[in-house]
């Protein structure tokens, strides 16, 4: 059933938000589009994140599932939601590895529930890998080219 | 030449430290080989038949004498005293130890070099016309755009786990010297009514399903280039096939959707991206371009003493017209007859580095034909340059001839190979050189791959040779009529394959057919296109 889908707040290992996490499960993208009251949804790699755009106002949690770490579609899903103005929690779940954390963060993820808990020290180091960045992404950091040309 | 500022340097240094950490976690057992593999691949480290192989990026094929010396030092310190220059304008070291890898990356970083994104399913090293900045026929120097793309694609957060690897080439003239339309994205910088922009092709590639990239946009305003690339990549990242590794390249997506539909989706994403605003500030391109300002060329003699026939032949074969008429670009052949295509010893690299410093504004290029290039040589200095090259075994006058063979590493190094490509290249070039047939045959691009992955560009050879496995024995398929240039085409298979002796003889047979049929001025490729496959088939397999 829909309520069994998704991760619970206890499974979240890293969270970069101050609000209370949603305390119930997520529904599929299809269900979210059919059902007018869902507030939490889970995106699978093959789902089109843009189907959710009409409902962003009512969503408080979007989980993006990474069944295998090598499938990078979830990075695009995340950025698309942020580009559309989604401000709720964006959680990376599944096969999430240490060396992907900084990229995921840049794509707009602000919470992480990896299948296998990550080594805390290694993960914190990984989040801080890039002091500067070359390209614009969902994190609105000023990029190196901006800094080079500031008056 | 581009030079790192403190930001670029910090990025590369951070990557070295990150890799050191990853290697440590692998050794501590915190990373499985499966998890470590994509990480080491993003740092150019492959596991091959006998050892690790490290692929170092040479962005758009441009490097300084000092950088070439650093590559020579690495060859001596960590490898067996040589390196292998590749068709993607990179260098590979074939005998690397995992424990040394982080130290090598640190050495590279000290010389503004790296191995970032030279493998893995990410945007690879950006290649460009090897005559960039020198060729008489270019609209502008394409390298500033390649550098802009390099920075944009380095550690791109959204495009690091693409369906498959992604290769981009940039040129800026009608002539295509970078196999541009055989790349995932090919860009030709053009000028329209005085405004610079980009013609964009998408979905080309070689491998087991070769395809020529169709045009998807005839003009992207240059201050929207990154935005357009971002859109093209996003459509690929979302919809490229991930169910089958062999169908995962963008060429399959473009083919299955059709160029028109792929283009429509990119345009839609492009409009969206323009609204989001992802382009770097305009001044950034100007900042980069300033590094590529033409060196201070000086006037000088435009003719030379051709009394030494060996020198005259080399000049005719291995030099290329320069935008300044007192200069030429000089090709350094890494194809001595009977040698290993693309290999250079540390000593040779140092000779080349010194020549660059003394005679070419400290600039060198790696060519996609696995040769090196001195881009700006005064005509007055050519004899001195040739003498030094000749003395170091790099003076073969064979650019674009049958001795100038492109060959992948093949079964001598590569774990995916079906057959050996290097010994075959050696035999063919040796035999043509010994018989004095090289000049008689003229321009003939022969390309050899040791398996269907086509690293040796065999689909694009005037003559292509592909190694296959036939009941456990090495066998070679011959194909004719390919081209990677502006007259791009894919080669067609002649018929049943040959064993090694057979294919050496077959190459000779097809050149005989050509010599018998050619009309004045025709290259092998022209004759083939005029007379078709039949006469070649007949000669090879009988009536
Ligand atoms: C020895 C280690 C190497 C391995 C394991 C390797 C592996 C591969 C594979 C698997 C492909 C097919 C990719 C696909 O079709 O999706 C490929 C294509 C290619 N590789 Fe290599 N390669 C190696 C060395 C090289 C070298 C030395 C060069 C340059 C001389 C090179 C240049 C290319 C090019 C140009 C292509 C085809 C163009 C394309 O469709 O992208 N590779 N390689
Ligand atoms: S073509 Fe095949 S044999 Fe040659 S390098 Fe590529 S993968 Fe190896």
Image (cartoon, coloured by chain):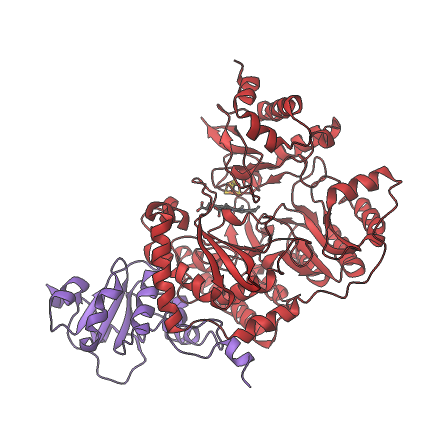
Residue B102 visible to an observer of this rendering: no
Residue farthest along the front direction in this orientation:
B193
Which one is in front, B359 or A74? B359
Which percent across, then down, holds residue B455?
53, 43
Residue farthest along the top direction in this orientation:
B543
Labels in figure, total: 0
* Chain identity for the colour red used in the image: B
Quarter holding residue B359: bottom right
Quarter of the N terminus of chain B within the rendering? bottom right
Residue name at image x 46 percent, y 47 percent: B213
Residue B239 visible to an observer of this rendering: yes
Which one is in front, B493 or A112? B493
Which percent across, then down, holds residue B140?
62, 60
Which percent across, then down, holds residue A116?
30, 66
Which one is in front, B304 or B182? B304
Residue name at image x 69 percent, y 44 percent: B334
Which percent across, then down, holds residue B531?
56, 25
Residue name at image x 59 percent, y 23 percent: B506
B539 above or below A8? above
Compared across the picture, whether B240 is left or right of B226 comes to left
* Chain identity for the colour purple used in the image: A
B203 above or below A148? above
Which one is in front, B107 or A17? A17
B9 above or below B50? below
Compared across the picture, whether B356 is left or right of B407 comes to right
Compared across the picture, whether B539 is left or right of B360 comes to left
Quarter holding residue A28: bottom left
Quarter holding residue A91: bottom left
């Amino acid at each position: 059933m829909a309520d069994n889908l998704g991760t619970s707040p206890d499974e979240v290992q890293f969270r970069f938000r101050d609000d209370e996490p949603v305390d119930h499960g997520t529904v599929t993208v299809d269900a979210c589009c059919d059902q007018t009251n869902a507030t939490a949804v889970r995106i699978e790699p093959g789902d089109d994140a843009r189907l959710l755009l009409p409902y962003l106002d009512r969503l408080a949690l979007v989980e993006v599932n990474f069944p295998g770490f090598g499938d990078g579609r979830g990075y695009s899903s995340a950025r698309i939601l942020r580009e559309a103005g989604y401000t709720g929690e964006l959680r990376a779940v599944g096969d999430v590895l240490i060396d992907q954390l900084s990229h995921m963060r840049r794509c707009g993820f602000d919470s992480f529930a990896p299948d296998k808990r990550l080594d805390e020290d290694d993960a914190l180091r990984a989040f801080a890998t890039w002091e500067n960045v070359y390209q614009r992404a969902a994190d609105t950091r000023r990029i190196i080219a901006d800094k080079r040309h500031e008056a | 030449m581009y030079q790192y500022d403190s930001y670029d340097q910090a990025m590369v240094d951070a990557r070295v430290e990150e890799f050191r950490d990853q290697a440590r976690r692998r050794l501590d057992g915190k990373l499985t080989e499966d998890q470590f593999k994509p990480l080491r691949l993003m740092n150019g480290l492959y596991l091959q038949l006998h050892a690790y192989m490290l692929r170092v990026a040479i962005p758009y094929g441009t490097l300084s004498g000092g950088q070439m010396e650093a590559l020579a030092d690495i060859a001596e310190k960590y490898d067996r005293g040589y390196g292998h220059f590749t068709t993607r304008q990179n260098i590979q070291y074939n005998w690397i130890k995992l424990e040394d890898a982080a130290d090598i990356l640190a050495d590279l970083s000290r010389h503004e070099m790296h191995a970032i994104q030279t493998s893995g399913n990410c945007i690879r090293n950006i290649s460009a016309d090897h005559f960039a900045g020198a060729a008489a026929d270019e609209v502008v120097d394409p390298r500033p755009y390649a550098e802009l793309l390099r920075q944009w694609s380095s550690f791109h957060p959204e495009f690091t786990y693409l369906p498959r690897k992604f290769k981009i080439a940039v040129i800026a003239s009608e002539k295509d010297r970078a196999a541009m339309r055989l790349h995932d994205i090919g860009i030709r910088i053009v000028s329209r009514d005085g405004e610079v922009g980009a013609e964009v092709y998408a979905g080309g590639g070689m491998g087991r399903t070769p395809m020529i990239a169709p045009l998807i946009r005839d003009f992207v305003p240059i201050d929207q280039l990154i935005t357009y690339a971002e859109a093209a990549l996003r459509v690929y990242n979302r919809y490229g096939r991930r169910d089958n590794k062999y169908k995962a390249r963008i060429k399959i997506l473009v083919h299955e959707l059709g160029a028109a539909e792929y283009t429509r989706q990119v345009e839609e994403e492009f409009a969206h991206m323009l609204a989001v605003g992802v382009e770097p500030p305009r001044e950034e391109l100007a900042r980069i371009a300033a590094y590529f300002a033409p060196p201070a060329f000086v006037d000088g003699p435009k003719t030379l003493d051709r009394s030494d026939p060996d020198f005259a032949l080399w000049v005719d074969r291995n030099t290329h017209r320069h935008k300044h008429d007192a200069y030429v670009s000089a090709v350094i052949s890494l194809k001595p007859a009977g040698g290993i295509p693309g290999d250079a010893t540390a000593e040779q690299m140092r000779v080349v580095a010194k020549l660059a410093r003394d005679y070419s504004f400290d600039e060198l290029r790696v060519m996609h034909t696995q040769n090196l290039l001195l881009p700006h040589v005064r005509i007055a200095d050519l004899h001195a340059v040739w003498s030094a090259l000749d003395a170091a075994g790099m003076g073969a006058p064979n650019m674009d001839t049958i001795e100038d063979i492109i060959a992948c590493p093949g079964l001598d190094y590569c774990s995916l190979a079906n057959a050996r490509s290097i010994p075959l290249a050696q035999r063919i070039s040796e035999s043509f050189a010994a018989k004095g047939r090289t000049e008689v045959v003229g321009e003939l691009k022969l390309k050899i791959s040791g398996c269907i992955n086509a690293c040796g560009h065999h689909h694009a050879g005037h003559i292509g040779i592909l190694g296959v496995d036939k009941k456990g024995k090495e066998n070679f398929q011959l194909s004719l009529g390919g081209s990677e240039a502006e007259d791009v085409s894919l080669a067609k298979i002649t018929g049943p394959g040959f064993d090694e002796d057979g294919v050496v003889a077959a190459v000779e047979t097809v050149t005989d057919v050509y010599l018998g049929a050619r009309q004045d001025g025709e290259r092998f490729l022209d004759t083939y296109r005029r007379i078709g496959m039949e006469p070649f088939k007949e000669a090879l397999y009988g009536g």
